[in-house]
């Protein structure tokens, strides 16, 4: 097994004031372990996401962006910061060991999607870019 860094991303463009919509991000190049969420936008928003392979929402409803999405310099860490063990994770001998090194990471299987649910709270037209940072699992 080999792990490679990956970022899965999607954009919700021209989201109307107070509008709510969904967008699917495909996971099509192998299983992935997601350990962080980053976002950029033209205004404030609320967010939630659901991997299709489990159907389990990350939060019970959309959450303010300041609570669920970080920046490239300071990502929102699902793993509590364990991803800092980057070299150990990349050299993990198997998936189970990698999951132990990245507690809280979300394992999303190949050929699934991650549905992001976004609601504008800025009161103006908003463009939201969301990225999921993690590792692609290679046999």
Image (tube, rainbow, N blue to C red):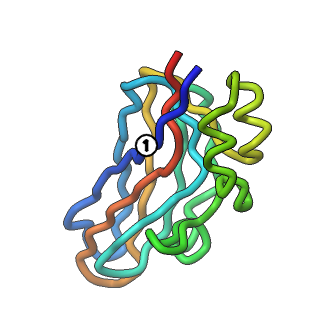
Identity of the residue furthest to the left in this view: 14
Q: Is residue 92 above or below residue 104?
A: above
**In-image side of 56 versus 46 (left or right):** right
Rendering coords of residue 101 (x, y %): 75, 42
**In-image side of 43 versus 55 (left or right):** left
Asked whether the viewer can see residue 93, the reply is yes
Q: Which residue is located at x 26 percent, y 66 percent?
A: 15
Rendering coords of residue 105 (x, y %): 67, 44
Rendering coords of residue 73 (x, y %): 48, 74
Q: Nearer the viewer, residue 31 or 123?
A: 31
Q: Is residue 21 above or below residue 1?
A: below
Q: Which residue is located at x 55 percent, y 77 percent?
A: 66
**In-image side of 25 versus 112 (left or right):** left
- The residue tagged with tag 1: helix, strand or loop? strand
Identity of the residue furthest to the top in this view: 139
Q: Nearer the viewer, residue 76 or 98?
A: 98
Q: Is residue 97 above or below residue 76?
A: above
Judge the density around disc 1: few (<14), some (14-19), many (≥20) Cα neighbours within 10 Å.
some
Identity of the residue furthest to the bottom in this view: 123
Quadrant of the rendering where the N terminus is positioned: top right
In which quadrant of the rendered view does residue 106 lie?
top right
Q: Nearer the viewer, residue 120 or 1?
A: 1
Q: Which residue is located at x 20 percent, y 67 percent?
A: 14
Q: Nearer the viewer, residue 94 or 105?
A: 94
Q: Which residue is mark 1?
A: 6
Q: Is residue 129 above or below residue 110?
A: below
**In-image side of 108 versus 89 (left or right):** left
């Amino acid at each position: 097994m080999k792990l490679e860094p990956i970022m899965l991303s999607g954009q919700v463009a021209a989201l109307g004031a107070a509008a709510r919509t969904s967008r699917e991000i495909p996971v099509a190049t192998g299983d992935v372990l997601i350990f962080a969420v980053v976002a950029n936008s033209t205004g404030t928003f609320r967010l939630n996401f659901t991997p299709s392979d489990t159907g389990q929402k990350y939060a019970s409803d959309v959450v303010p962006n300041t609570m669920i999405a970080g920046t490239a310099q300071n990502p929102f860490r699902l793993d509590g910061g364990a991803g800092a063990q980057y070299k150990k994770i990349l050299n993990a001998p198997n998936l189970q060991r990698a999951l132990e090194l990245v507690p809280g990471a979300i394992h999303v299987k190949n050929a699934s999607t991650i549905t992001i649910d976004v609601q504008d709270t800025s009161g103006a037209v908003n463009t939201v870019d969301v990225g999921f940072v993690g590792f692609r699992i290679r046999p």
